[in-house]
Amino acid sequence: MLRGAALPYEKDLLEALAGIAATSPFRRMAKAGDFTMPVAMTNCGAAGWLTDRTGYRYHRNNPDSGQPWVREGR
């Protein structure tokens, strides 16, 4: 819809995304019904969206590491 609107911020956005992915790596989650999502995703902030065979929800910690999605100060 806003083709090219983020181009002036591309470098900053990619650096921020790399920092998020360093703490909370991209992962392909399983959905209820035993299907794996076709895309990989990461989360940041106070709570991250996740899904597994039990359903969808928000959670404060990354289930893979047990750590907050993004540590304070990042």
Image (cartoon, rainbow, N blue to C red):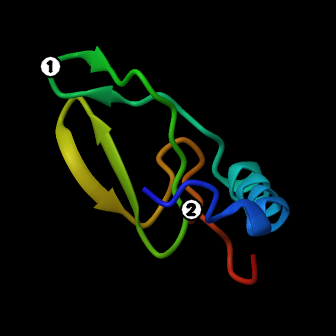
Residue 55 lies, with reference to residue 35, above or below; the image says below
Which corner quadrant of the image does residue 31 belong to? Answer: top left
* Residue depicted at x 54% and y 33%: 27
Residue 22 lies, with reference to residue 45, above or below; the image says above
* Residue depicted at x 40% and y 21%: 38
Residue with the mark numbered 2: 69
The answer to whether residue 15 is left or right of residue 49 is right
Which quadrant would the C terminus be assigned to in this image?
A: bottom right
- Residue 59 image label: none
Residue with the mark numbered 1: 33
Q: Secondary structure at mark 1?
A: loop
User: Identity of the amino acid at label 1?
Assistant: Gly
The answer to whether residue 54 is left or right of residue 10 is left
* Residue depicted at x 56% and y 65%: 68
Crowding around mark 2 (Cα neighbors within 10 Å: few <14, some 14 to 19, many 20+) is many
User: Identity of the amino acid at label 2?
Assistant: Trp
Residue 56 at x, y percent in the picture: 21, 46
Cα gap from disc 2 to disc 1, whole angstroms: 25 Å
Residue 35 at x, y percent in the picture: 26, 16
Which quadrant would the N terminus be assigned to in this image?
A: bottom left
Q: Residue furthest bottom?
A: 73
Q: Nearer the viewer, residue 65 or 30?
A: 30
Q: Secondary structure at mark 2?
A: loop
Q: Nearer the viewer, residue 3 or 6?
A: 3
* Residue depicted at x 66% and y 43%: 25
